[in-house]
Amino acid sequence: MVLSDLDGILVANADFYDAHERRDFDRMCAVWEHSDRATCVHPGWPILRGWDAVRDSWERILNGPGRNQFITTNVSVEQHGEIAWVTLDENLMQGARTGTVAATNMFGRSSTGWKLILHHGSPVMAG
Amino acid sequence: MVLSDLDGILVANADFYDAHERRDFDRMCAVWEHSDRATCVHPGWPILRGWDAVRDSWERILNGPGRNQFITTNVSVEQHGEIAWVTLDENLMQGARTGTVAATNMFGRSSTGWKLILHHGSPVMAG
């Protein structure tokens, strides 16, 4: 089955959150483009650039104590050729705590599907 | 003079911070692409989508009491065809307070230069 661009982007985006929720490091690695332009800003973190730095952060996060459930809402997809970007709200449930993170996820089209090249998450202040 | 892509992207990026520092609403409007895909996440804010919502936020911010000086560092530029994205640290000085915001700025190439299509800023937590 060949996915449409929109379907492929949404599948890649969903894989990212699924890998995080399941704490599946191999799957998280498969979501990302392994390149120098891979860039990640976790909420409150400084910018991480390059796949090595991004991979290390996910290894630590997915091996850490946090257990997150993501409900994604307010999803919008834009595409221009081989670049796509998704903006959305990550509604997080971590135990009894909840919060919203505004996220930008950029993807690049590869021969094996859309790969995450940039993730930027920022906490939305209540009120 | 015709600017190279890299120069054009950096000029557009610098214009964005200059317009903010000078509180020049018209210049801020000229920086942005006036389209439905214009998207802005101010630090701590929810996602604003579409030029009308983005413009209104800048009108309020630039008419508000805040006076910000930006020193941009750690600047990285990526480009793929007509889409470019810059990640950087915004080192903010607002009176005696300082802070760092991690920013992603996406630009689209138009007949009149590179226009901002997405700004996402997130406060970097100290330590």
Image: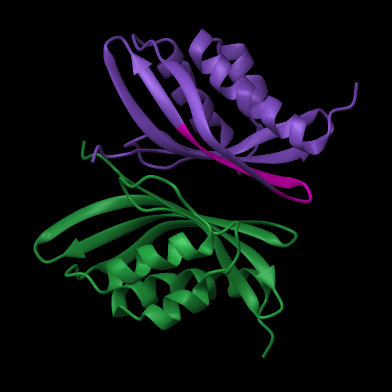
Chain colours: A green, B purple
Q: Dividing the image into 4 quarters, which one contains the N terminus of chain A?
A: bottom right
Task: Read off the magenta span.
Answer: B79-89
* Residue B87, x across and y down, in percent: 54, 41
The residue located at (34%, 58%) in the rendering is: A90
The residue located at (36%, 31%) in the rendering is: B100
What secondary structure do most residues of the magenta stretch adopt? strand
Is residue B3 among the parts visible in the rendering? yes
**Which of A77/A22 is in front?**
A22
Is residue B23 among the parts visible in the rendering? no
**Which of A48/A87 is in front?**
A48
The residue located at (30%, 80%) in the rendering is: A22
B98 displayed left or right of B49: left
* Residue B21, x across and y down, in percent: 49, 13
B97 displayed left or right of B24: left
* Residue B40, x across and y down, in percent: 49, 37
The image shows residue A122, relative to residue B25, as above or below, that is below
Instruction: State the image quarter where residue A95 is shown.
Output: bottom left
Residue B106 within the magenta-colored segment of the rendering: no
**Which of A58/A17 is in front?**
A58
Residue B85 within the magenta-colored segment of the rendering: yes
The image shows residue B108, relative to residue A119, as above or below, that is above
Instruction: State the image quarter where residue A73 is shown.
Output: bottom left
Q: Dividing the image into 4 quarters, which one contains the C terminus of chain A?
A: top left
The image shows residue B52, relative to residue B26, as above or below, that is below
A99 displayed left or right of B6: left
